[in-house]
Amino acid sequence: MKINNDSHLTEDRIVKSVADKSELLYSEKEHLANCSVCSAVLESFENDLKQLAEIAALSVPSPKRRFFAYEKKSERNFPRVFGLRTSLAAAITLLFFVITLHSDSMKSLFDAKTGSSIDELHSDDLFITEINSLVENALPRRYTDIYGEADPDYDEDSMDFIIPSSGNDTISEDGEGGLLS
Amino acid sequence: MPGERLLSGMSEQHQNIYPPPGGSGKASETQTVLLAQKAVSGSSHAFNQLADLYYNKIFKLVYYRIKYKMDAEDLTQEIFAQAFRNLNSLKEVEKFKSWLFSIAINKVKDFKRKKQFTSLFGILSDRNIKDEQKPDTEPDSRPDANPLYNVMRQNFWKQFEEVLNRLSYLEKEVFLLRFLDQLGINEISVALDKNESTVKTHLYRALKKLKHDDSVKGLLKESLP
């Protein structure tokens, strides 16, 4: 480090000066301005670095392309909450639902389905009525006609006549279990 | 042509296309701030003007670090595309340059990391690992670039890489940003997200190492006429 005008700047101070001139003290700057030896050393080092930079700059090939930025107007004018693709997919799905719900074919499909279910309900009612009447009168009407009683409230005698009870059964004498009528 | 050197291999006209660094000035800074303001408020035209203004600087920054033209072209495009997409994150338009350079540095870092990862598993698709390790071998397509210039260019980058390999990552980065990319200490501190004293310390260490390195002198002797 420079102490007085007789001693030159050290190499460290010269390097510091090249890195940043403001690092030098006032007295050092003053010495540099007056001392041809120190200023020559500093100049030589700075020149070397300058030449190195110049050669490096000249040794770079020239770029062939240039950059061109395009303004995306749609993005700037329309603030997007979701991405463009998501918004588009949502819009298409919504449109699809609206069209399908309001189309004639969908309406007729719904109408046909409703009509057939009403018919089914009606036939079910008829079937239940028939079952109930059969529960009430187990034998069809023509059987009551056979035994001459249109009235289903038959008496015991007539039933015994048509279907004899098991107490009146007679076992055959041969013992083979055959029924004697 | 035994005495011909790298600089004399280029014509005067070529040297004018690539003026010596540091010629931007105050007017350029004002223009950058004005354009950055317009770009942040949504003008893609203003951003395109900024891209024109900084395209070569960013391309050079990338090339200094990866030394492969095709990759440097792709990365430069990606850097500007990313900057355009993230313009809203630029809080101070005055710091546009540092902000753009920080994007570039991070992009290069990502690229190198990715390259290391792929070479680790041998998944290089279009070039083999040997080619990846060599500096750019593609000849310069400029009409005034003669074959000797191309040879010297390749030789320069090879030697320059050897010189830089003596520095640590941060020393190298600070040195490149200060002397090759021509950024100020303040701009470097913003671009690297480090405080100014850290930047100065690393720059000082890098310069001290290079001052004692004879290969820098040798490199200059070989390249200059």
Image: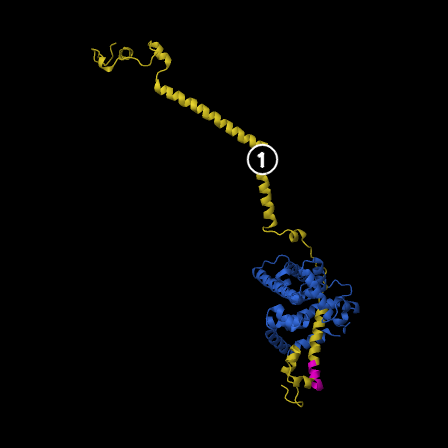
Residue for point 42% across, 22% down: A127
Looking at the image, which is closer to me, B170 or A58?
B170
Looking at the image, which is closer to me, B204 or B70?
B204
Apparent colour of chain A: yellow
Query: What residue does disc 1 label?
Result: A102
Find residue B204 and report its image quarter. Answer: bottom right
In the image, residue B210 lies at what x, y percent? 64, 77
What's the amino acid at mark 1? His
**B98 relative to A47, above or below:** above
Q: Which residues are magenta?
A: A33-42
Q: Secondary structure at mark 1?
A: helix
Left-right relation of A11 to A113: right
Residue for point 58% across, 42% down: A94
**A142 relative to A86, above or below:** above
Is B10 within the magenta? Answer: no
In the image, residue B162 lies at what x, y percent? 64, 72
In the image, residue A180 lies at what x, y percent? 24, 10
Q: Chain of mark 1?
A: A
Quarter holding the N terminus of chain B is bottom right
Apparent colour of chain B: blue
Is A34 within the magenta? Answer: yes
Majority secondary structure of magenta residues:
helix
